[in-house]
Image (cartoon, rainbow, N blue to C red):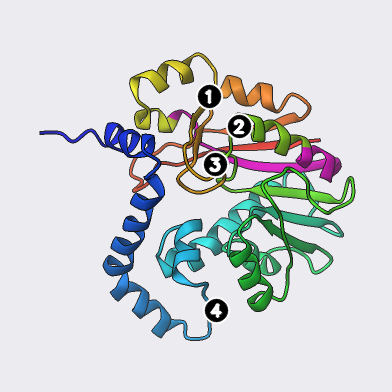
Amino acid sequence: MKINTVAIAAFVRSFGLIRTLNFVRFLVEKVSNRTANKAFKKHYPNIHLPPDYIMFESFGLDYSRYYLNGRETCKWIVDEAWPFIKLENTNILDWACGPARVVRHMPDFVPKSVALFGTDYNLKSILWCKENINSVTFNHNSDQATLPYDDHFFGLIYGISIITHLSVEKHQEWIQEMYRLLNPGGILMLTSHGDNFKSKLSREELLIYNSGQLVIRGNTKLGHRTFAAYHPTKAMQQLFAKFEILKHEQFDQAGLSYIPQDLWILRK
């Protein structure tokens, strides 16, 4: 008998227990990845790693994926940005940086003239970042769409799987804030839950998605990994109306062990 995981998750979410289920998942990963994580620490003894639960909340409890995949993602961001902007003498923001999975590697891929910043609503993540990552200036923010930077301060802002955990209202508010922060000609890079994730939706959610509206799974903490948003192309085009859409890529998931998110590259 096939188990309907979508229905089970919806049932758990309806009782406000999705974060409890998420913590159980953390414990399972801690046990199942114990050997591999121990091997990573032995092979990379000088790498500073965040506490296990902080890492899990941002990306999963896999030391190799946190560090090595974070480095690959950093290079990918820079490679995607270069055709549209010269990353020299500018400021770069990792929006919702978590425990610096990506931005800690940025000094290896951008000129020294670039100033790096990271911001996140998780205070524990930011405190860890400030104590362990010296090449980036970190800021703790609330869930309100207001950051302590001047207008037109950044040449590049990127958010990897960030709008995937926002309410409809917060989509609008945060995109407005990103627009304020970018200098004219600046680039905003975001990833989203696009058509590849339609298989994750219930019948009712699919009807909403196919009508061009955002699908929101809430009843949990806004911004947490258990809060999910799904993004049809029509809704995204409306959301990004003030930007020039330079690129929208939906990646082929054939042969992958995960479902790839869409990439959006926007110019102010």
Other residues around mark 3 within 10 Å, as few (<14) / some (14–19) / many (≥20): many
Sooner in the amino-acid sequence: mark 3 or mark 4: 4
3 or 4: mark nearer the eye:
3
Q: Secondary structure at mark 2?
A: strand
1 or 3: mark nearer the eye:
3
Q: Secondary structure at mark 3?
A: helix
Q: Is residue 31 above or below residue 14?
A: below
Check whether the beta carbons of the residues at disc 4 and disc 1 lie within 8 A of each other: no
Check residue 191 for magenta coloring: yes
Other residues around mark 4 within 10 Å, as few (<14) / some (14–19) / many (≥20): few
Please tell me the numbered disc located at residue 165. Answer: 3
The residue to which callout 2 is attached is 248
The residue to which callout 4 is attached is 48
Which three-letter amino acid code belongs to the residue tagged 4?
His
Determine the CA span between mark 1 and mark 3.
15 Å
2 or 3: mark nearer the eye:
3
Sooner in the amino-acid sequence: mark 4 or mark 1: 4
Q: Quadrant of residue 190?
A: top right
Determine the CA span between mark 4 and mark 1.
38 Å
Q: Nearer the viewer, residue 211 or 113?
A: 211
Determine the CA span between mark 2 and mark 4.
35 Å
Sooner in the amino-acid sequence: mark 2 or mark 4: 4
Q: Which residues are magenta?
A: 177-195
Q: Quadrant of residue 137?
A: bottom right
Check whether the beta carbons of the residues at disc 2 and disc 1 lie within 8 A of each other: no
Determine the CA span between mark 2 and mark 3.
19 Å
